[in-house]
Amino acid sequence: MHRASIRSRLLAGAAASATLAALVAAVPAGAAPPASADAAAAPAAAAPVAAAPVAAALGDLDTDGEYTQRFLELYDKIHDPANGYFSDQGIPYHAVESLMVEAPDNGHETTSEAYSFWLWLETSYGQVTGDWEPFNDAWATLEAYMIPTTENQPTNGAYDPGSPATYAAEHNHPSGYPSELDSGVTVGSDPLAGELSQTYGTDEIYGMHWLADVDNVYGYGAAPGSGELLGPDHEGTSYINTFQRGPEESVWETIPQPSIDDFSYGGEFGYLDLFTADPQPAKQWKYTNAPDADARAVEAAYWANKFATEQGQPEAVAEAVGKAAKMGDYLRYSLFDKYFKTPGCDSPSCPAGSGRDSAHYLLSWYYAWGGALDEQAPWAWRIGSSHAHFGYQNPMAAWALANDPDLVPDSATADDDWSKSLDRQVELFQWLQSPEGGIAGGATNSWDGAYAERPAGTSTFYGMAYDEAPVYHDPPSNEWFGMQGWGVERIAQLYHETGDDRAKDILDSWVPWVISHITVSEDDWQIPSNIAWTGQPDTWDPENPGDNSGLSVEVTGYGQDVGVAGALARTLMYYAAASGDTQAQQVSHDLLDALWTQSSDPLGVATTETRGDYGRFDDVLTEPDGDGVYVPEGWSGTMPNGDVIEPGVSFIDIRSFLRDDPEWDKVQAHLDGGPEPEFTYHRFWAQTAVATALADYDRLFGDVVEPPEDVEAPTAPQDLTATADGTTVELSWTASTDDVRVTGYDVTRDGEVVAGVGGTTTAFTDAGLEESTEYTYAVTAHDAAGNVSAASDAVTVTTGEGEVDPPAGACTAELSIANSWSGGYQGAITVTGGAEGVQGWQVTVPDGLTTSNMWGGRLADGVVTPESWNADLGPDQTATVGFIGNGAAPAAQELDCTGTVPAG
C-alpha cells in the first residue's frame, strides 16, 4: 500500500480517530429507548474565541537564540490569518489544505489531536515570551467547541453505573455490521461514575470528542450547544464521526455521520442501523474520546504550569491547569476494559468486573459515551476500550496526574489510579521492546473485538494478549514510524523530568537504533517511514523480564514526514539533555537544521507527497470482504446535500462536495488514468511538532552547548569478504566506527559505486553479473557530516558459469494477497522448510511481479532471496516476506522454492 495510505489508516496524526467507538448506538442493558423524540430548542452556540495574536510583547525574556527565532518565525506563519491554519471561529484545521484524506476525510475537519498540539504550541510560546494569554485562549476554544455541552449530552443523569452498556461484538470487516446487541452477555460495573458526579456536581463527561467538521461542509449542523441538528444553514463547527466498523474499515470505506442523530438525514433511523441492529432505535447523541489527545493536553498543561511558575506567574495559567486536571480525572475511563470485564477475558462469558478489577491501567484506543435525545425518556451509556497501542501511552501525563499537586485530579482515587497507570505504561514499553530497540504494537483484552479465544501460544501482559497491530490490520497499525516518535518522546520527557531508570533503559536501546536510520546531508534528509515486525515478545514477568529474542523489527521504508522528524528531534534532545549523550544532541541538531533549511516554505515546513492511494476515491465494493464502502443490502439514505447512500457507492459518491475543491482536477486526472497526484500538505500537528522542537532546543541547550563541527571521518570497514555463487556475489564486512555515527556505506565494483546501504547494514548482494568474470570490490563508510572513510582492503572474486540451481524439495512457498487497491497491493510470500529444513532458500515469483517495498527478503531478476536472519529454516519452520506490489495483484498461488538440505 502506498505509504500515504498507511498514514491515512494510522491517523497520520490522528491516532485519534480511534475508531471503534464501536457501537456507539449501544443502549444500556434493560433500557427501553423510545422510537422518537421531540426536538428540543437548541441554545445559542458558544461565542467564537479568537485565535492567538501573531505577535506579543516579549518582555525581558531571552528570545535571541537561533532556534528560538526560528520558532517565533514559524509561530507567526501558523497564526497568520492569510495562511489558513485557523477557521473564522479560531479553530485549528487539521491542515491548511482542504482536499486531504487520512484519518479526517478532509483537511478542514479538526481533531482533538489538533487542539492538543495547539496547546503545546502556545505552551512553547508562553515559555519563550512570558505571554500566557494565547495558551488560555486555546483552552477556552477547546472547551467551547470540542467538549460537548450540557445540551449536547442531555441525558447523562439516567446513566446506570451498574449496567454501563449493552454488549455488541466488533467484527473484522464492515460487512459484519450492523452488529447485534446482546443483553445476554454480562458486563461489569463502572467504578468511576459515582465518584466523578460527586466530585464535580454533574453527570456530564469533561472530555473531548475526537472529530469535528469545522466549516459544516457535510451540513449536519451538530453544533456545540444544540440538542438537534441545525442543518446546512449552520455556520460553524459540527460534531461528526466516521470510523465505526472494525479493523478493516479504512477511511475510504467509512460513512460519515453526525454525533447528534435525530433522524434528519441518512435513512429511516438516521445512520444508527448501519452500525447496530436495533429494530426501533431511538434518536440519540454519541461521542468518542481519543485518549492520547486528552493526555497530550494534560501534558502540555504540566509544562505550561512549570514554565509559568519558573517565571513567577503561576496564576497566569492556574484556571486552565485546573481544567486539565479535571480532564485527566475523566480520562480514567480509558484505563478500563470496554465492557468492564476482567483482564484475561477469552470468552463473552468471562467474568464481569467490579471496582478496579476491570482496569488494565493503559491509555486505550478510546472511551465513548452516549444516550437518548429525548429527556422525557432518558437513558445513557458509557464504555472504555479493550485495545491498547504503545503509541497512545503517555507516562509523562500519568506522572503529572499522580504527582504534580496542581494536576492531581480532585477525585479521591484519581492519584492512585494514575500512579498505577504510570507503572503499567512504562512496563508496556519494556515488554514490547525488541532487541533492536523498536517498540512493538500493543495488547488487547478482547481478541477480534469479541472476547474470542486467543491463538495458542500468544504472549500476555497482565492477562492481555499481545496484538501485533492493535485496532487496525489493513495496513498494520504498528507499521507507521510516527508511533515510535510519539510514544517514546513521552518516555524521554519522563526520564528528563524524573530520572526514571526504567525510562533510561528503554531509551538506551531505542536511541542508537533510531539514530542509525536517520540520514542528514547538506541537500537531503530522511527518516524511517515504515517498519515491519516478526515474532512476539516473551510473556511479561515484571520480576524476571525475558530478552524478547523472538521479537524482531526491520525498517522497510524511508521518507520525509516533517511532523515525525520533529517528534524524533524532540525525543533525542530530551534524552541528550538528561544523559549527556552528545551524539543524540548532534542528530537532533542536524535534523532540525535540515528541516529548516531544506523544507521551509512560505506557509511553514513541508515536503511533497505522492498520493497513489487517491486512486481509491471511486472504489466500489465488488466482493463481500473486499475494499469499498459497504452499505447493507436494502439500506438507503441521503446526505444533507442530497448525495445518495446505497449499496454500490464510492467514497466520493457520498462526499461530492470534494469535486468542487480547487485541487480536485489532479485527483480526477489520476482516476482517468493519469499519474499519481502530488500534494504539499501543511498539517497543523506537524507544524507544531517542528515548532516546539525548535523552542525546546534552545531551552535545553542554548548556544553554549552547540554541537561542535564534525570533521572526523569514520574508520575504514574491515574484514571485507566476497563469495561468488553463479552470477551473484555476496559481500560482508565488519562495521566502521565514528566519533558521532556512521550513517551508511558505499560499495564499489571495479572502482565505480554500485550501491549504498544504511549505517547498520554490513552486507550486500550483487546480482545479475556476467558469467566467469573477475570483479574487484571495496567499501567506504560515511557519517552525517559527509566525512568519508578510507576504503577497505579490496577483494577480488570470479563468478561461476551461470546460476547453479539449488536442489528442489528443500522448501515450499506460497503467495498470498492481504489487500489490493487501484495501482497496487500488499502481498506476502510464506516459505516453509521441508522435512529436513532448508538453508539459503530461493523463491521464483510470477513473471512481471515488481515491488515498491519488500521486507524479510530481497527481489532481483524474478527471484526472492532471504535476509541473513531468515535464510535457514528448520523442518516446517516458516519465514514470511512481505511486500508492496505494483499494478494488479496476482492470484494467490504456490511458488517454486529451492534451497540446500542441511547435511546430516
Image (cartoon, rainbow, N blue to C red):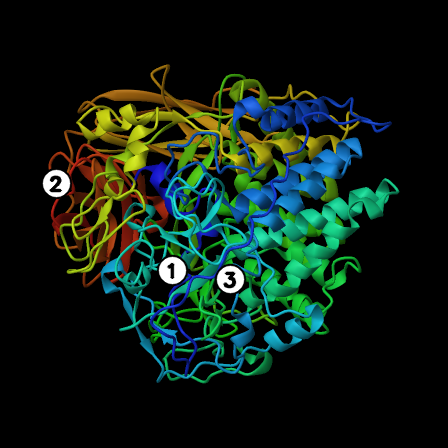
Q: Regarding mark 2 in the picture, which secondary structure is present there?
A: loop
Seen at 27% across and 66% down, the residue is: 178
* Mark 2 surroundings: few (<14), some (14-19) or many (≥20) residues within 10 A: some
Q: Where is residue 143 in the image (x, y as percent from the top left)?
A: 62, 50
Residue at image point 48% right, 41% down: 214
Q: Quadrant of the N terminus?
A: top left
Where residue 118 sits: x, y (%)? Answer: 61, 40
Mark found first going from the N terminus, 1 or 3:
1
Rendering quarter of residue 198: bottom right
Against 485, is 225 above or below?
below
Badge nearest the viewer, 1 or 2: 1
Name the amino acid, label 3: Ser
Which residue in the protein does label 3 denote?
A: 364
Going by the numbered disc 1, the residue's amino acid type is Asp
Q: Nearer the viewer, residue 282 or 569?
A: 282
Tell me: 831 left or right of 237. left
Q: 204 or 230: which is nearer to us?
A: 230
Q: Label 2, on which residue?
A: 846
Q: Which of marks 2 and 3 is nearer the N terminus?
A: 3
- Cβ atoms at labels 1 and 3 below 8 Å apart: no
Above or below for 807 versus 269: above
Tell me if 57 is positioned left or right of 49 in this view: right
Report the residue at 68% width, 61% height from top: 326
Q: How far apart are marks 1 and 2 (CA)?
A: 54 Å
526 or 680: nearer the eye?
A: 680
Q: Is mark 3 on a helix, strand or loop?
A: loop
Q: Name the residue under label 1.
A: 262
Callout 1 crowding tier (Cα within 10 Å): few <14, some 14–19, many ≥20: many
